[in-house]
Amino acid sequence: MSPATHAAPDTVLVVDFGAQYAQLIARRVREARVYSEIVPSTMPVEEMLAKNPAAIILSGGPSSVYEEGAPRIDRALFEAGVPVFGMCYGFQLMAQSLGGTVDNTGAREYGRTDLHVSKSSSTLFEGTPDEQHVWMSHGDACSAAPEGFTVTASTDVVPVAAFENDEKKLYGVQYHPEVMHSTHGQQVLEHFLYRGAGLTPSWTTGNVIDEQVAAIREQVGDKRAICGLSGGVDSAVAAALVQKAIGSQLTCVYVDHGLMRKGETEQVEKDFVAATGVQLKVVDAEERFLTALKGVSDPEEKRKIIGREFIRVFEQAQAEIIADEGPAVEFLVQGTLYPDVVESGGGTGTANIKSHHNVGGLPEDLEFKLIEPLRKLFKDEVRMVGQELGLPEEIVQRQPFPGPGLGIRIVGEVTKERLDLLREADAIAREELTAAGLDRDIWQCPVVLLADVRSVGVQGDGRTYGHPIVLRPVSSEDAMTADWSRLPYDVLAKISTRITNEVRDVNRVVLDVTSKPPGTIEWE
Ligand SMILES: Nc1ncnc2c1ncn2[C@@H]1O[C@H](COP(=O)(O)OP(=O)(O)OP(=O)(O)O)[C@@H](O)[C@H]1O
Ligand SMILES: O=c1[nH]c(=O)c2[nH+]cn([C@@H]3O[C@H](COP(=O)(O)O)[C@@H](O)[C@H]3O)c2[nH]1
Ligand SMILES: NC(=O)CC[C@H](N)C(=O)O
Ligand SMILES: [Mg+2]
C-alpha cells in the first residue's frame, strides 16, 4: 500500500510450516527492530522471492520431513542468495534438501535441554556461552549436516543441533530460539539478522506512522472516511492515525449495540472526543442487534450476525453523513490487528479458531473500501504507535474488549435481561480489580454468564436455582497465548461475595484456570 516515495522496509519472511510459534518468531524479529511478515509454506518460492525479502526464516512444524505429504520447500530457495535461518522443522527441511541426513533416531527432546556450543566464534553464537539452555520440541533429528556446513552446536543426544554456512548465508538450529526458555535465543536470532543477513535494526513504529499517513492520504484523496470507534485501543489509535492523515475528512462512528459494558458509551462520548477533538456520531442500535440475535446461541452464528449488523449500521451512518453534503464517504477505517487476521484464518492458511467480527465476520456484500492501518501490528506495537501519536495513557493502556461485546460472553441466547444481569456482574468485577490496583497486571478479565446452566444454591435460608458467573482473568503479551492470572484470594472473594449478593439470579461465581491454549480467552 505504500506509495513509491516510501521505500518498503527490509522485510524478513517467516515461512509457517504449521508452527505453534510462527507469530512469536515474527514478533521476536520485530523486537530486533527488523520488519517481518508471516507467509504460508504453501506459497510458491517464486512468489516469496518476488516480495524481495531481506532474509527468510523457516519455522517449526508438526510434520516429519521424510513422511509422504509433509510440507516441503523448493530447493531454489536456498540458491537464491537470500539468507535463510531454519528452526526445528525448518532446520530439518534445510538439512534434508541440501543433502544432509534427517531421521527418527529415537533422540526425542521435549522441553529444556542443555546445548553445547562447539564454535563460540560462529556467526550465530559469538558472545554467547559454550553451555546454554535451549527449548526443544522434536522427535526427528539431523545426524549429518549437508556438505559445506559447519556444525556449531550439539546436545547430549543430538550430534547436530546447529549448523552454519557463511558462504551461502544459510543457518539452522534444532531448537526454538524464539521462546523465552532458550536463554540466548534472542541474541542468536539477532546474530542471524545482523551478522548473517547484514540487516540493521532500524524498523520502528515511527516508520509505521509516516508510511501509513502518506499511504492513507494517497488512498483517500479528497473523499471522506468513517471509522468504527469502540473506545478500545485499536480503533482509538487507528482513528488518531487516520485523523492525522486526513483531518476533518474523517467521522468516527460509535455503535451502541446494547452489548457494551456499563458506562462505556458515556466514556467514549466524553474521553475520546476530549482527547482528539474528532467528529463523533453515536448510533443507538440496541434494538436492531438484539432482534437479529434473537433465538441464536451458536457462537459463530452470533459473531457473523454481529459482524453483519455492524456493517449495516456503518452503511446507514454513511448515508446520513452524505446527506449532510460534501464528498462521498467511500472508506471504512477499522482497528484490525495482526492477531485478528491470523486467528480468523486469514493470514497463513492456519485453522479458523473464531471469526473476529471485523475480519472473518464481515458480510460478503461489503461495499466500503477498508482502511486498516494496524493490520500488520501486534497489540504492544499498537500501544507504542498510540503513545507516539500523543494519545493519553488511559486510552493507550486500556484493556481490550471484543467488538461483539457481551454478546459472546453469554453462553446461550442473548437477551436484554441477561445482558443487564451480566453488565452488573461485570461492573462489580471491574470495580474491585481497579480498587485493588490490578488493572495493569492483567491483560483483561472477561466475565461470562452461563445462561444455559443452572445450579442449586442457598440464599437467605431458601433454595435458589440460579446461574453461574465465570471470571476469566488472564495475563498475556499479545492475546495469541495467555495464562490465567493468579489474583489474590481476597480480591476474588470480594468479587464473588458482591456478585452473589448484588446480582439477582446468580448464586455461584467460578474461576477459569485454563491457559491459552487450550482455552481461548473469550468463551465463544
Ligand atoms: N461499538 C463499536 N462501534 C464501532 N466500531 C466498533 C465497535 N466495536 C468494535 N468496533 C470496530 O471493530 C474493530 C475491532 O474491535 P476490537 O475490539 O478488536 O478493537 P478495539 O475495540 O478498537 O480495541 P480493543 O482490542 O482494545 O478493544 C475496532 O477497531 C472498531 O473499528
Ligand atoms: O474485536 C474483537 N472482535 C472479536 O470478534 C473478538 N473475539 C475475541 N476478541 C479479543 O481477542 C483476544 C483473543 O481472544 P480469544 O483468545 O478469545 O480468541 C481477546 O483480547 C479477546 O477479547 C475479539 N476482539
Ligand atoms: N517442533 C518442530 O518443528 C518439530 C519438527 C518435527 N515434527 C519433529 O518432531 O522433529
Ligand atoms: Mg474492543
Image (spheres, rainbow, N blue to C red):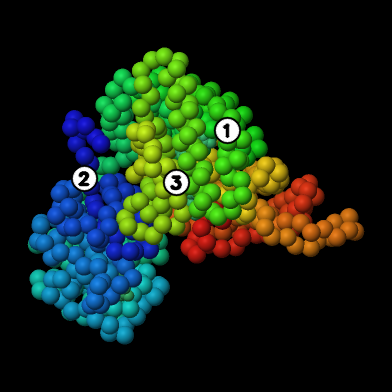
Quadrant of the rendering where the N terminus is positioned = top left
Residue at 41% across / 48% down in the picture? 360
Relative to 161, say whether 234 is above or below. above
Q: Is residue 150 visible?
A: no
Residue at 50% across / 38% down in the picture? 309
Residue at 29% across / 36% down in the picture? 207
Mark toward the start of the polypeptide (3 vs 1)? 1
Q: Which residue does the numbered mark 3 point to in the structure image? A: 361
Residue type (three-letter) at the residue carrying disc 3 = Gly
Based on the displayed image, in which of its 4 quarters is residue 133 positioned?
bottom left
- Closest to the observer, 276 or 454: 454
Quadrant of the rendering where the C terminus is positioned = bottom right
Relative to 22, say whether 372 is above or below. above
Which element carries disc 2, helix, strand or loop?
Answer: loop
CB-based contact (under 8 Å), mark 2 and mark 1:
no
Measured in 3D between alpha carbons, the distance from the residue under mark 2 to the one under mark 1, in whole angstroms, is 44 Å
Q: Which of labels 2 and 1 is toward the front?
A: 1
Measured in 3D between alpha carbons, the distance from the residue under mark 2 to the one under mark 3, in whole angstroms, is 32 Å
Q: Which residue does the numbered mark 1 point to in the structure image? A: 285
Dot 1: within a 10 Å radius of its alpha carbon, few (fewer than 14), some, or many (20 or more) residues? Answer: some
Mark toward the start of the polypeptide (2 vs 1)? 2
- Quick check: is the Cβ at mark 3 less than 8 Å away from ligand 2? yes
In the image, residue 139 lies at what x, y percent?
A: 33, 78
Relative to 237, say whether 75 is above or below. below
Measured in 3D between alpha carbons, the distance from the residue under mark 3 to the one under mark 1, in whole angstroms, is 18 Å
> Which residue appears farthest toward the right when viewing the image?
461
Residue at 41% across / 45% down in the picture? 359
Q: Is residue 66 visible?
A: yes
Q: Which residue does the numbered mark 2 point to in the structure image? A: 10
Based on the displayed image, in which of its 4 quarters is residue 488 positioned?
bottom right
In the image, residue 223 lies at what x, y percent?
A: 33, 22
